[in-house]
Image (cartoon, helix red, strand yellow):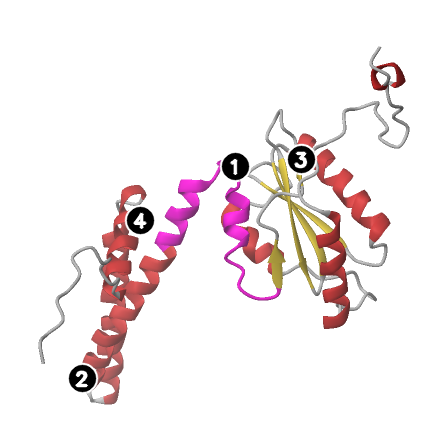
C-alpha cells in the first residue's frame, strides 16, 4: 500500500510541550525571575526527597521520587507565574474582567457581551448567573461604575425580586477586587443568610428571563424618561 503524502498546508498538531514552551515564553517576557523560581522549586523538592531518604535509609529510592516530583513542582510554578503574566497583560484593557470570568468552568454562566455600557467613558457591566443568584461585575472607576451597575441592579430587581443580586467592582482602587482575584471572588458569592440557593428549575427560569431582556443597554441620558417621550407629530405629518 502506498503511503499517504502529508498535506504541507495542513496545520501542525499542537503537542503538550508546545503549550508549555509557549507559556514559558509568555511568562518570561514579564517575569525575568521565572527560571530561578522554577529551579528553586525543583531543588527544594529534590532536597525534601533526599532528607526523607536519609531518614528512611532509602536514599536512592526517595531521591528518584524527588526528581520526578521536582518536575511537577516546576510546572506548578510555571503555571502560576504564567497566569499572573497573562493577567498583567490584559489588566486595564476593556473586557479584561470578562476574560477572567470565563476561566470559571462550573457554577456560573456569563454573557459574552456587557449588559450595560457608557459609550463616553467605556465603563461596562458584565452579568453572570448561578445558583447563588445574579452577579454584576463592573469595569471602571468606582464613582462611575457603581452608578452604572446600580441602574442595572434596580432593573433586574423589578423583574426578579426574589433573586439575590451581587455587585462586584474590578480594579485596584479601594473597595475593588483586583483582576487576578475576580474569579475566586465570584466563586465565593453566596446568598444572604436565610435565602437558599436557586434550584436547577429556578436557575433555568431565571436564565430564560435574562435572555428575554436582550443584550447591551446604553444608559438613558439624565432627565429623559422613555415612558413619557412624545412623538413629533409635525414631523410625522411632513411639516
Residue picked out by circle 4: 27
Check if residue 52 falls in the magenta segment. Answer: no
In front: 4, or 106? 4
Q: Which badge, 3 or 1, is on the more N-terminal residue?
A: 1
Q: Circle 3 is placed at which residue position?
A: 145
- Which label lies toward us, 2 or 3? 3
Q: Which mark is residue 59?
A: 2
CA gap, disc 1 and disc 4: 22 Å
* The one of 20 and 238 positioned closer to us in this rendering: 238
Spatial CA distance of label 2 from label 4 is 35 Å
Do the numbered discs 3 and 4 sit on residues whose CB atoms are within 8 Å? no
Q: Label 4: how many residues lie within 10 Å, few (<14), some (14-19) or many (20+)?
A: many
**Which comes sooner in the sequence, label 2 or label 4?**
4
Task: Say which label, 1 or 4, has the lower sequence index.
Answer: 4
Residue at screen point 71% across, 53% down: 211
Q: Secondary structure at mark 2?
A: helix
Q: Is residue 233 above or below residue 6?
A: above
- Expressed as whole percent of the image width and height from the top left, the position of residue 194 reads 83, 66
Q: CA distance from mark 2 to mark 3?
A: 60 Å
**Mark 2 to mark 1: distance in Å?**
54 Å
Q: Earlier in the sequence, mark 2 or mark 3?
A: 2
Disc on the earlier residue, 3 or 4: 4
Amino acid at each position: 500500500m502506498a503511503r499517504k503524502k502529508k498535506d504541507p498546508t495542513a496545520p501542525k498538531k499542537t503537542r503538550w510541550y508546545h503549550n508549555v514552551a509557549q507559556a514559558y515564553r509568555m511568562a518570561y517576557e514579564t517575569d525575568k525571575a521565572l527560571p530561578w523560581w522554577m529551579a528553586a522549586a525543583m531543588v527544594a523538592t529534590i532536597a525534601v526527597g533526599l532528607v526523607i531518604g536519609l531518614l528512611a535509609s532509602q536514599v536512592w529510592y526517595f531521591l528518584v521520587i524527588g526528581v520526578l516530583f521536582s518536575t511537577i513542582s516546576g510546572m506548578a510554578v510555571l503555571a502560576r507565574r504564567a497566569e499572573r503574566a497573562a493577567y498583567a497583560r490584559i489588566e486595564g484593557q476593556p473586557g479584561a474582567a470578562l476574560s477572567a470570568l470565563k476561566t470559571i468552568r462550573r457554577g456560573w454562566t456569563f454573557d459574552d457581551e456587557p449588559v450595560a455600557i457608557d459609550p463616553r467613558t467605556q465603563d461596562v457591566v458584565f452579568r453572570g448567573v448561578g445558583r447563588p443568584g445574579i452577579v454584576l461585575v463592573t469595569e471602571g472607576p468606582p464613582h462611575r461604575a457603581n452608578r452604572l451597575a446600580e441602574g442595572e441592579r434596580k432593573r433586574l430587581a423589578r423583574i426578579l425580586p426574589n433573586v439575590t443580586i451581587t455587585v462586584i467592582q474590578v480594579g485596584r482602587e479601594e473597595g475593588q477586587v483586583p483582576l487576578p482575584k475576580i474569579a475566586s471572588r465570584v466563586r465565593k458569592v453566596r446568598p444572604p443568610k436565610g435565602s437558599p440557593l436557586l434550584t436547577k428549575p429556578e436557575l433555568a427560569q431565571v436564565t430564560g428571563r435574562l435572555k428575554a431582556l436582550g443584550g447591551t443597554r446604553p444608559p438613558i441620558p439624565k432627565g429623559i424618561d422613555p415612558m413619557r417621550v412624545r412623538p413629533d407629530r409635525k414631523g410625522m405629518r411632513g411639516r
